[in-house]
Amino acid sequence: MDTRFKLRFMANKKGQLLREALQEWRISKRALTAIKFDGGLLTVNGVERNVRHVLDIGDCVEVTFPPEERSDGLAIENGDLTIVYEDDAILVLDKSAHQSTIPSREHPTNSIANVVCGYFQQQGLASTAHIVTRLDRDTSGLLCIAKHAHIHHLTGLAQRHGQISRQYEAIVHGHVVQDVQSIVAPIGRKETSIIEREVRQDGQYAHTDVTVLKRFYFNNEPMTHIKLRLHTGRTHQIRVHMSYLGYPLIGDELYGGNRQYIGRQALHCVSLDMEHPLTNQTLKFSSLLTEDMQRLLNESSA
């Protein structure tokens, strides 16, 4: 059985080179190289052709991508996945806290990527885990995975054009003064750490919108429940920006919070909106806050 990923297109321009049509259909040069040398195929009306073939209106072009291989360092594991949505192109999951998105030296096993590879193997899918929207190990909520390198390429283009929207909810130390604000402050790696980031002039552009949902007290300590929208996706962006404002996330010891009330940073991806990379259908996903965060809100006082 041929499990290779395939796409079909209809030519709509007379005399156009196949190479030009593939470019318009957003097939990357890297993908074309893989198709040529690694076991892919291009056909027009069922006949194998090369990229110099001249198309006619109505020609049926089929692109067969080569099978993908996992990197040697990504082990296949079996485990539980909370699947919110799945089709032939993407997989949307609801990740729990204390689980890495990808394996690391400190946490080499049981990552989302490891378990997804096991899930794909069970499906007979010749692919690896392509992370579209990544979450920190202790951040919970929605994340998206592409089932193929070409889909990952398309979602990468969508992200660069601001067509994938993520909203988070967090609980921070202190009472945030402004009801609504935008944080535009560049983020870069802290010189004294391989993990920690900070706001710095030579960092990468980073933009976060913050909206106050509720100001409250928990055990007489002021806290604020906030909603955040990411316009960029820098590492630790929300955590760095809120610490920069003087309101570190509850439980975020790396950036000035403490774990007296919760055993991880109180951060959850509550919504993910995107256009489907193949159909352009609008997709909207949501996730409820986890019990540990909800407990702080339920037991709070005004």
Image: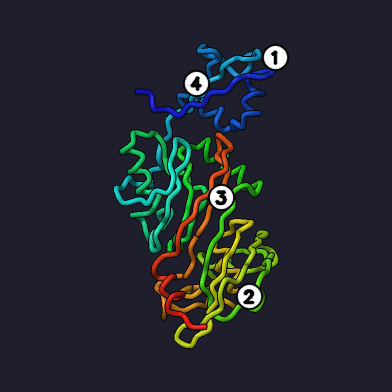
The local crowd at label 3, few if under 14, some if 14 to 19, many if 20 or more residues have their Cα within 10 Å, is some
Residue 248 visible in the picture: no
**Do the numbered discs 1 and 4 sit on residues whose CB atoms are within 8 Å?**
no
Q: Which residue is nearer to you in this view: 150 or 220?
A: 220
**Do the numbered discs 3 and 1 sit on residues whose CB atoms are within 8 Å?**
no
The local crowd at label 2, few if under 14, some if 14 to 19, many if 20 or more residues have their Cα within 10 Å, is few
Label 1 sits on what residue type?
A: Lys
Picture residue at 62% right of the left edge, 15% below the top: 58
Label 2 sits on what residue type?
A: Leu
Q: Earlier in the sequence, mark 1 or mark 4?
A: 1
Q: Which residue is nearer to you in this view: 129 or 188?
A: 129
Label 4 sits on what residue type?
A: Leu
**Do the numbered discs 4 and 2 sit on residues whose CB atoms are within 8 Å?**
no
Q: Earlier in the sequence, mark 3 or mark 1?
A: 1
Picture residue at 53% right of the left edge, 41% below the top: 152
> Mark 4 sits on what residue?
41
| Mark 1 vs mark 4, CA separation in Å | 22 Å
> Mark 1 sits on what residue?
14
Residue 82 visible in the picture: yes
Q: Secondary structure at mark 2?
A: helix
The local crowd at label 1, few if under 14, some if 14 to 19, many if 20 or more residues have their Cα within 10 Å, is few
| Mark 3 vs mark 1, CA separation in Å | 37 Å
Q: Secondary structure at mark 4?
A: strand
